[in-house]
Image (cartoon, grey):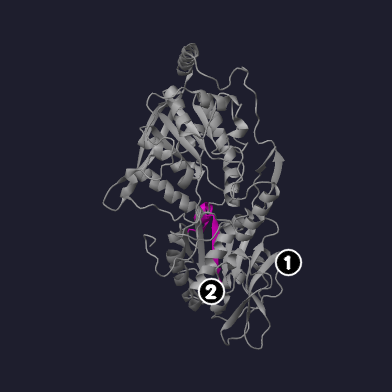
């Protein structure tokens, strides 16, 4: 028996189950033994007949390659091409899709990706492709499996490439470019508390926390006609035996095993195979707190771009199963900033924040301003929200046209993340004035969505001092934040009591006033949205790097990803 992970966001569900289904070979004589001349001849005859049959029934596969070619000394352009492959001359290698991993987020991503990956393999198998399962260091459970025997018994190739049994850490073509990620810390992107809990759980299961894998994740079905091996020599023998020239790598992790294993992209590329990476069926080990300080998924994009420039082309799973390329649920990059207020100049500060703090990390920001001739109208909002992953609100007492406010309501009802600052607590409500004709208000936006209770603000006085709310110090949004370095430059909002669904993060005070929550999270009761709100947002607040980092962290928390670190002052584009 073994253990594997069933994915649920924010949890560490594990169940005990059989991770592999072993079956004795039908022929009990299929054991490792001394080869005889007659056995070799018989094997060759049988294989030739099987190959002829496979060729006769094989279906063509149309693949759409993507690679990057130099256009200038500094720039590369995307180049596409289409090829038809004979499936009998095609193999898919599944790299290190293990049943467990030391990084919990890596486990979650594999569990999310695995059903689509299995569909790809089932489809490729039906077309006549060879499927090679390569869960490194996990051969023991499969020793008697027909797929394992097939790999072990493949005749040795007449010419084995030099170094095919070894890791390949770079090929000459890569010397022309800079490696795009700092992965020297191992690339783990777990929340520290969850990471510790996960390792305790692994140890409790009798697994070594730093290397807990024992088999391939069993959502990936292994058929008896497949092959199982983690040996570069054995896999090369299989490819040569079957005259396979087209090789597809999928699995994890792109920047480590997929590239470097003896059966990985580099070895296949340098030794003449027509190799591609299936770029939507992979994941990296990259920690956003390391250079180039981008989100985890953008880190994957960076390594894929490197591969397309210097190693080999890529394809997507669409070439095998149709539809759209796979995308992780938390790979959310499209942000709409809805800006309409006259007091805090966020029409200036937020676009600057987007340009300097969000877009370099890989987010795609669309800014929607209120119209100059009608402050209640937000041209382009409806269309922008159709493509948005997150809504960032900085609006004060505006009543948009009904279709525009309905688009906001629809976005929220879909459970999508939302960030609000400062006047978002009274974004869509007027004091005592009804909205204009064909316009609408949302008077309960603050308590229902933000979880607040805005009733005005304390008078203007000294700058607001901040303190971490009781029990909030370990919250991911406050990671790397020194609250003592943040001062509120605007008046302190009166917001008590907050909704019971909120988690206060920062409190604000100044002399002779009660403590007021100043930043918090909310989980919307009906739709489950993650929401982050702060009453900070004065123009001078944006001059403070700690406040800008707080916003980035809050935004990433609502999406459910680790926040990229702030580059050090000495940071340069080369990561030096």
Q: Is residue 490 above or below residue 359?
A: below
- Specify the segment rendered in magenta: 380-396
**Looking at the image, which residue sits at the far right?**
500
How many marks the image carries: the answer is 2
**Image coords of residue 332 (percent x, y):** 53, 53
**Image coords of residue 428 (percent x, y):** 60, 68
Secondary element at tag 1: loop
Residue position for label 2: 537
Q: Is residue 15 above or below residue 227?
A: below
Residue 405 visible in rendering: no
| Disc on the earlier residue, 1 or 2 | 1
Q: Quadrant of residue 493?
A: bottom right
What residue is at 62 percent from the left and 56 percent from the top? 195
Structural distance between the alpha carbons of marks 1 and 2: 24 Å
Pick the front one: 374 or 355:
355
Q: Is residue 532 above or below residue 86?
A: below
What residue is at 60 percent from the left and 34 percent from the top? 140
Is residue 452 magenta-colored? no
Pick the front one: 564 or 456:
564
**Looking at the image, which residue sits at the far left?**
73
Few, some or many C-alpha atoms within 10 Å of disc 2 (few <14, some 14-19, many ≥20)? Answer: many
Residue position for label 1: 500
What residue is at 61 percent from the left and 38 percent from the top? 217
**Image coords of residue 471 (percent x, y):** 68, 70
Q: Quadrant of the N terminus?
A: top right
Secondary element at tag 2: loop
């Amino acid at each position: 028996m073994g253990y594997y992970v069933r994915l649920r966001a924010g949890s560490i569900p594990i169940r005990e189950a059989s991770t592999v289904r072993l079956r004795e070979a039908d022929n009990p004589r299929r054991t490792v033994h001394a080869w005889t001349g007659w056995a070799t001849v018989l094997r060759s005859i049988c294989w030739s007949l099987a190959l002829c049959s496979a060729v006769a029934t094989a279906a063509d596969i149309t693949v759409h390659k993507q690679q990057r070619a130099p256009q200038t000394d500094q720039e590369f352009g995307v180049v596409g091409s289409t090829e038809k492959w004979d499936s009998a001359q095609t193999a898919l290698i599944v790299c290190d899709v293990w049943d467990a991993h030391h990084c919990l987020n890596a486990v979650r991503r594999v569990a999310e990706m695995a059903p689509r990956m299995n569909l790809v393999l089932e489809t490729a198998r039906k077309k006549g492709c060879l499927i090679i399962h390569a869960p490194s260091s996990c051969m023991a459970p499969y020793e008697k499996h027909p797929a394992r025997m097939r790999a072990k018994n493949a005749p040795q190739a007449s010419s084995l490439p030099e170094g095919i049994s070894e890791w390949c850490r770079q090929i000459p073509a890569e010397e022309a470019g800079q490696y795009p990620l700092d992965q020297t810390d191992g690339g783990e992107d777990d929340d520290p508390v969850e990471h510790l809990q996960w390792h305790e759980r692994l140890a409790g299961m009798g697994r070594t926390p730093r290397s807990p894998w024992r088999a391939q994740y069993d959502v990936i079905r292994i058929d008896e006609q497949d092959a199982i091996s983690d040996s570069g020599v054995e896999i090369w023998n299989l490819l040569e035996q079957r005259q396979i020239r087209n090789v597809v790598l999928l699995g994890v992790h792109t920047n480590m095993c997929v590239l470097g294993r003896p059966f990985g992209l580099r070895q296949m590329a340098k030794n003449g195979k027509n190799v591609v990476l299936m770029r939507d069926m992979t994941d990296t080990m990259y920690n956003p707190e390391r250079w180039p300080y981008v989100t985890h998924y953008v880190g994957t994009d960076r390594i894929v771009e490197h591969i397309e420039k210097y190693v080999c082309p890529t394809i997507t799973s669409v070439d095998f199963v149709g539809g759209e390329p796979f995308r992780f649920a938390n790979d959310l990059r499209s942000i709409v900033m809805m800006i309409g207020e006259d007091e805090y100049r966020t029409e200036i500060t937020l676009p600057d924040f987007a340009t300097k703090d969000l877009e370099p990390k890989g987010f795609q920001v669309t800014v929607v301003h209120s119209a100059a001739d009608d402050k209640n109208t937000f041209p382009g909002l409806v269309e922008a929200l159709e493509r948005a992953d997150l809504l960032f609100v900085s609006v004060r007492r505006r009543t948009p046209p009904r279709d525009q406010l309905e688009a906001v309501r629809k976005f929220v009802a879909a459970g999508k993340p939302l960030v609000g600052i400062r006047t978002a607590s009274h974004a869509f409500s007027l004091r005592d004035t009804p909205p204009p004709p064909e316009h609408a208000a949302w008077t309960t936006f603050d308590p229902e969505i933000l979880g607040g209770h805005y009733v005005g603000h304390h008078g203007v006085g000294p700058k607001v001092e901040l303190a971490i709310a009781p029990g909030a110090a370990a919250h991911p949004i406050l990671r790397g934040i020194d609250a003592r370095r943040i001062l509120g430059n605007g008046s302190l909002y009166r917001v008590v009591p907050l909704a019971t669904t909120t988690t206060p993060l920062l409190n604000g005070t100044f002399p002779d006033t009660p403590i007021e929550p100043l930043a918090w999270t909310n989980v919307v009761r009906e739709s489950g949205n993650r929401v982050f709100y702060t009453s900070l947002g004065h123009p001078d607040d944006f001059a403070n790097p700690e406040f800008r980092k707080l916003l980035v962290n809050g935004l990433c928390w609502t999406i459910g990803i680790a926040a990229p670190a702030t580059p050090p002052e000495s940071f340069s584009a080369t990561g030096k």
